Image (spheres, grey):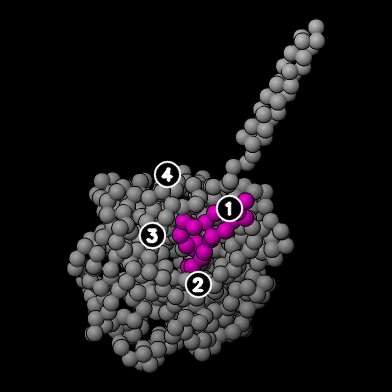
């Protein structure tokens, strides 16, 4: 009997131990795995997953995870070698030899070399909204497996910095031929730390890690980007945990989010400027007095103070404050409604009505800015009707040539891609009327065109700056666009997200080193 009791007790002991072991396994097995998928909330969807054809600088942060830029620009203006690891300039300043990084492969296994670089630079010059960035290029010649010689029409000092423009990227030439140039967006193949999985329009972009990445295996396993045009929904998505990182945080919300111990707010420097392009080839904006009147009517300083809580900077010239060659001495306008009314009267443009195209969510607080402009113009007897379009649709509409464009005015942003004012204003050259460039004002000045050619070719730094100043003086007088403000770049993320870096073009850098802290 005792033996049976001891046997029963032994069985019970073994059962308890077994159950304890199972419990331990269950606890260990259900412990949360380290987070390895980054979900980004953006103000717009990527219009097309082809960097050479895309628009919206912030979208570059997603696109560049697949198709990488040639060099990287840091927020303090430094150039960091990337796919192009070194370069030399000839004595006459007209030829640059670019050396591509060795050992880099596209995710289809084909090599990245000088010929692949040439193919992609030509493709950028054919398709991109920013094609004027390389307008000075005269010829390209492959000078070895990893050497590409580029000859420019004349010496161009900011050339290497311009290669940091994150629309200048590389795709597999083999893949381009395989799927066709027009279909690359359906199956893009790059060299980046992540590979394309899918793009469900209006819903999400999904990328997966490229474990063969030349810079090392990414720490994240996947990236998902989702559009949240409504800023309130974007904030809520971050605070509820639906997303991990968001862009275009309103200044007032940034102050609130910064108090949340689980979140971090970042405000890197920005090269973004916001303008209203005016179609100078159509009434009512053929007359520069009408264009000037609108500028006098808008209180830029009040917009910066009341809408952006002082985080933006009013523009007194077309380009970003502090860029090389920048000057603000030709802003003679200020806020002057009486002067605006007089100019309209002189131009015979009383009871003026026009339409402004706008994409809600594309630019930070742009809806409030548009409302403010409406109010200011109403005070001088001008009615501005607003047509809201999704970003991709507006980009396509605004790219029409002058004889087909229905656009009278449009709120768009521009930038300096290389820290030089030339990059911000060169598209006002008449050679860059849409769709050849970004001159959506369809404005032309023979003197401006001549100065543009001179400043991009001279080796005399003093004379170049003088030319840039005169170009800004012409633009401030002619007013082909209303230069409003420099837009702040404000991001917010979960505090556990580490290893994220930004560039001045409102975009995140390569995320191959990003990870979530336990």
Instruction: Give residue 75's mark.
Output: 2
Mark 3 and mark 1: Cα distance apart in space? 23 Å
Q: Quadrant of the N terminus?
A: top right
Instruction: Give residue 197's mark.
Output: 4
Instruction: Give residue 516's mark.
Output: 1
- Residue 129, given in percent of the width and then of the height, sits at 37, 64
Q: Main secondary structure of the magenta part?
A: loop
Q: Which residue is rendered at x = 60% and y = 65% of the image?
A: 266
Are the two marked residues, 3 and 1, in contact with CB atoms closer than 8 angstroms? no
Disc 3 target residue: 68
Q: Secondary structure at mark 2?
A: loop
Instruction: Give residue 194's mark.
Output: none
Q: Secondary structure at mark 4?
A: strand
Which segment is the magenta one?
496-518
Mark 2 Cα shell of 10 Å, populated few (<14), some (14-19), many (≥20): some
Can residue 180 be seen in the rendering of this structure?
no
**Disc with the residue nearer the chain's start (4 vs 1):** 4
- Residue 436, given in percent of the width and then of the height, sits at 32, 66
């Amino acid at each position: 009997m005792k033996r049976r009791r001891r046997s029963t007790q032994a069985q019970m002991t073994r059962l308890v131990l077994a159950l304890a072991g199972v419990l331990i396994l269950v606890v260990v097995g259900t412990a949360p795995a380290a987070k390895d998928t980054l979900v980004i909330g953006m103000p717009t969807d990527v219009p097309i997953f082809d960097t050479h054809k895309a628009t919206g600088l912030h979208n570059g942060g997603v696109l560049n995870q697949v198709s990488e830029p040639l060099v990287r620009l840091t927020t303090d203006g430094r150039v960091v070698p990337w796919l192009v690891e070194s370069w030399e300039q000839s004595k006459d300043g007209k030829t640059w030899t670019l050396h591509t990084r060795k050992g880099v492969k596209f995710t289809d296994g084909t090599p990245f070399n000088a010929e692949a670089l040439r193919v992609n630079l030509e493709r950028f010059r054919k398709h991109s909204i920013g094609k004027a960035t390389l307008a000075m290029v005269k010829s390209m010649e492959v000078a070895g497996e990893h050497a590409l010689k580029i000859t420019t029409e004349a010496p161009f000092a900011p050339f290497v910095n311009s290669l940091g423009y994150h629309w200048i990227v590389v795709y597999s030439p083999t893949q381009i031929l395989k799927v066709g140039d027009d279909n690359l967006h359906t199956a893009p193949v790059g060299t980046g730390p992540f590979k394309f999985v899918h793009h469900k329009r209006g819903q999400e972009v999904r990328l997966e890690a490229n474990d063969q990445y030349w810079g090392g295996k990414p720490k994240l396993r996947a990236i998902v980007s989702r559009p949240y045009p409504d800023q309130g929904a974007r904030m809520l998505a971050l605070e509820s945990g639906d997303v991990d990182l968001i862009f275009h945080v309103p200044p007032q919300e940034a102050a609130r989010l910064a108090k949340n111990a689980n979140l971090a707010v970042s405000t890197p420097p920005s090269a973004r400027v916001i303008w209203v392009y005016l179609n100078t080839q159509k009434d009512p904006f053929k007359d520069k007095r009408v264009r000037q009147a609108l500028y006098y009517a808008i209180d830029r300083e009040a917009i910066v103070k009341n809408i952006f809580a002082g985080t933006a900077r009013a523009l007194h010239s077309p380009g970003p404050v502090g860029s090389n060659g920048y000057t603000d001495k030709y802003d003679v306008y200020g806020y002057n409604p009486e002067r605006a009314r007089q100019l309209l009267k002189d131009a015979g443009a009383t009871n003026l009505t026009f339409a402004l195209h706008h994409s809600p969510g594309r630019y930070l607080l742009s809806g409030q800015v548009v409302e403010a402009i409406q109010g200011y113009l109403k005070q001088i007897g001008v009615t501005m009707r607003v047509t809201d379009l999704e970003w991709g649709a507006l980009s396509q509409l605004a790219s029409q040539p002058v004889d087909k464009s229905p656009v009278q005015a449009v709120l768009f942003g521009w930038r300096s891609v290389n820290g030089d004012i030339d990059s911000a204003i060169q598209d006002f050259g008449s050679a860059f009327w849409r769709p050849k460039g970004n001159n959506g004002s369809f404005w032309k000045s023979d003197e401006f065109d001549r100065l543009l050619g001179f400043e991009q070719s001279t080796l005399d730094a003093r004379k170049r700056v003088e030319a840039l100043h005169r170009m800004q003086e012409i633009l401030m007088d002619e007013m082909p666009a209303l230069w409003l403000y420099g837009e702040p770049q404000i991001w917010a993320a979960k505090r556990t997200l580490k290893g994220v870096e930004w560039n001045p073009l409102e975009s995140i850098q390569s995320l191959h080193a990003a990870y979530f802290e336990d």
